[in-house]
Image: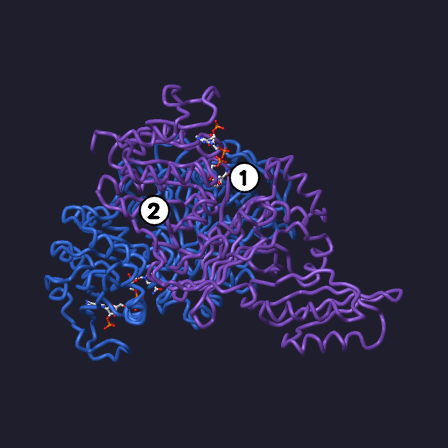
Chain colours: A purple, B blue
Amino acid sequence: MRTRPLKVALLGCGVVGSEVARIMTTHAEDLAARVGAPVELAGVAVRRPSKVREGIDPALITTDATALVKRGDIDVVVEVIGGIEPARGLITTAFEHGASVVSANKALLSQDGAALHAAAEQHGVDLYYEAAVAGAIPLIRPLRESLAGDKVNRVLGIVNGTTNFILDKMDTTGAGYQEALDEATALGYAEADPTADVEGFDAAAKAAILAGIAFHSRVRLDDVYREGMTEVTAADFASAKQMGCTIKLLAICERAADGESVTARVHPAMIPLSHPLASVRGAYNAVFVEADAAGQLMFYGPGAGGSPTASAVLGDLVAVCRNKLAESTGPGESAYAQLPVSPMGDVVTRYHISLDVADKPGVLAQVATVFAEHGVSIDTVRQQGKDGEASLVVVTHRASDASLSGTVEALRNLDTVRGVASIMRVEGE
Amino acid sequence: MRTRPLKVALLGCGVVGSEVARIMTTHAEDLAARVGAPVELAGVAVRRPSKVREGIDPALITTDATALVKRGDIDVVVEVIGGIEPARGLITTAFEHGASVVSANKALLSQDGAALHAAAEQHGVDLYYEAAVAGAIPLIRPLRESLAGDKVNRVLGIVNGTTNFILDKMDTTGAGYQEALDEATALGYAEADPTADVEGFDAAAKAAILAGIAFHSRVRLDDVYREGMTEVTAADFASAKQMGCTIKLLAICERAADGESVTARVHPAMIPLSHPLASVRGAYNAVFVEADAAGQLMFYGPGAGGSPTASAVLGDLVAVCRNKLAESTGPGESAYAQLPVSPMGDVVTRYHISLDVADKPGVLAQVATVFAEHGVSIDTVRQQGKDGEASLVVVTHRASDASLSGTVEALRNLDTVRGVASIMRVEGE
Ligand SMILES: NC(=O)c1ccc[n+]([C@@H]2O[C@H](COP(=O)([O-])OP(=O)(O)OC[C@H]3O[C@@H](n4cnc5c(N)ncnc54)[C@H](OP(=O)(O)O)[C@@H]3O)[C@@H](O)[C@H]2O)c1
Ligand SMILES: NC(=O)c1ccc[n+]([C@@H]2O[C@H](COP(=O)([O-])OP(=O)(O)OC[C@H]3O[C@@H](n4cnc5c(N)ncnc54)[C@H](OP(=O)(O)O)[C@@H]3O)[C@@H](O)[C@H]2O)c1
């Protein structure tokens, strides 16, 4: 074993960073044995230098992250600050100074992944980010390496623990969205401003990263269709139950049937109770991967939290340190397939539509005609009426999102349709 | 991209090998893009040269595997013959001639893994074997790389599809063992001689490989305690149901509570229906991994079959080819922790014991005394009696396997105990 240590600069020492530092300290001997050289925490950049940080030598703390990265003796930079800047600038500076980077930053990777990968390659260093998607669950490495000889056709997953906690609560207790959100906030599963989670931005960033890797193409956050889950109601769950389904916020990345393009989207969807994703409880994450030869694989585990996320960061840290010692690098960006990302209108799936209609003869015929005119074939219709008011629940066969949108627009123009109460996609069948 | 191809020798072209060859041919462009150089099938060794092999150039076929491996221009040898010899000799020869090896051979790896790893390291080449455990499911790579910065405490899994198919059938249809086995055989899920599967040898080989990697120690097939599932009865399933459990053949690798030793075992066990492994149907495999920082992870997918296994082989092939191009090697054997493997008697778990007893007063007191004398504390007792005969079902708290064996021996010596109908461990709680 080499005795000269590999030096690590830790940028950020919050929820994730403090756990990274703790494990690096308490498991130093194991890390050294696994890497083949001691791994030393050489500096820790934070915003508030005076904050007490248990187990961390105060001499390591600095507020000048840039100077730390530029020191010249740093082998690996671990970026767990989050957000676009200063993280992006610091990572680029790290590359310029010959350091490899391990990051947990989904926001940055889903926006600037291609440029960052190019910079890493240019400087002959590594950029690893297993922790950016689904916390502790190994996903990036299995997609990038284990399935490197296979053809991935679909990635379907629950990649946000906050929204899964909320939806699971709504499902099991009958609570409304606000009540479930309040409980998630009280228990620390939702942040004070839950927008990034409940509006699907966090899941969309992860979908972009997963799609890019799975399809060997470039998929950016902007390419991902996104719908949040704030409008899911207790009534939606009741409808889902009648269909033998539950509702999950899903990230779905698909290769088109002709293989010439891909789609990536995040939205609430009904999935059958028999689907393994239906039984993913609380804040857990789980991701299904469908590949030509491998068939259906599922990866399940804690999708966030300081220590699970740190586990993923440390796995990357060991890999990147080994590469440094071997003077090599791991697999970089693989975007050779250059598949374009199709718009949401091209996505083909099934739909569950709930309409408020006038309770009089001929309404069903009118509605059915509109579906037929737009080429959307109906699987089942359920009609419930009382006091001149009625509701009509239509479940369609597979149709493009564009046809469905056209159908819904036309339905809204029917005199007999008072309103479209909800539209939800049906997945995982 | 380099234009000179990497040359691959395929040893064996059966269920797995023929799929490896097929994918190498049909996905040649993708493989080249992912590796960074064309990957060429340079020769295929088989036993029966005259057999028609669709899609394979007959000029590539040879019966002289040794000559193929010694050719001098082979970069990677893919060994999918199986068994100890000639596979072992061929792999060693491959190393001596500078070739890296990808293998799916659990029998060989669980017996001679250490020696083979040492030989690979000596010659500066790779030995990869993701396909040896649980087919397409990425497990070796996640354990070896993703969790390299974490401390794994437990691996608990269904790693044999044949036995899971049989047990699932018994559970869902009430069939007996023989009937379920016959169906598995008819459907091609069990081989003509099912011994390796139903007696747990196959699962034990996988447990040895998983334990070695998870605990950074050496665990050989001989170190694994093994009980098959041929004696599981419909009555056992009925008892399991009464406890809210089902029965699975599990491979369990554990770090002892004091961290100073490990155990590895394969046996049928009751697990609660609420445990995710309980709902693993048919021939699927699934493995739970518990680690200090990551928490509980689960990996699920098809555990065997030509094309899923080929997917794992090809993932390794891409990795090994990349390493060849980079003139580096991936992580080798990591056995630095050198934890000893404790005997089965040291394993601590819970037990479900079914006794046939005389239906007379005082029997329960006698039986309870025997448990107490051996330090095995009873959780619940259920008594059923008719016509002077009775059965007593005892579920214990956690106790060592040695104490339980002592208890059972003493119970057999009681006049009032007519027989011990079944003993089953209870896991996953
Ligand atoms: N938390 C999770 O469960 C989780 C899961 C997966 C991925 N991630 C990702 O991990 C990253 C970190 O998340 P987190 O939850 O650990 O965040 P956090 O708790 O808010 O910690 C951020 C850390 O960065 C430091 N920091 C902020 N601005 C800085 C600056 N300009 N210069 C130097 N240091 C600065 C903060 O310093 P102070 O301590 O002085 O405030 C703090 O230590 C994010 O990219 C996040 O998306 C988090
Ligand atoms: N099948 C699965 O689902 C599965 C799953 C995981 C791992 N594995 C592992 O993969 C390996 C291969 O399994 P398999 O199911 O593909 O076996 P298989 O169908 O029996 O194929 C074995 C192949 O090896 C060839 N062979 C046998 N002896 C040979 C020799 N002395 N020299 C050259 N070639 C020889 C056979 O030639 P002929 O074609 O001429 O008979 C045949 O092509 C085993 O280690 C197995 O444990 C299999």
Q: Is residue A415 left or right of residue B226?
A: right
* Picture quadrant where residue A261 is located: bottom left
Q: Nearer the viewer, residue A92 or A411?
A: A92
Q: Residues within 10 Å of mark 1 (few under 14, many from 20)?
A: many
Return the chain for callout 1. B
Q: CA distance from mark 1 to mark 2?
A: 24 Å
Ligand 2 within 8 angstroms of badge 1 C-beta: no
Q: Residues within 10 Å of mark 2 (few under 14, many from 20)?
A: many
Identify the residue at image location x=77%, y=71%.
A414
Disc tally is: 2
Label at residue B224: 2
Looking at numbered disc 1 in the image, what kind of residue is underneath it? Thr
Q: Badge 1 is on which residue?
A: B396
Q: Position of residue B19 (x, y in %)?
A: 32, 69
Q: Earlier in the sequence, mark 1 or mark 2?
A: 2
Element at label 1 = strand
- The correct choice, above or below, for A256 with respect to B419 in the image is below
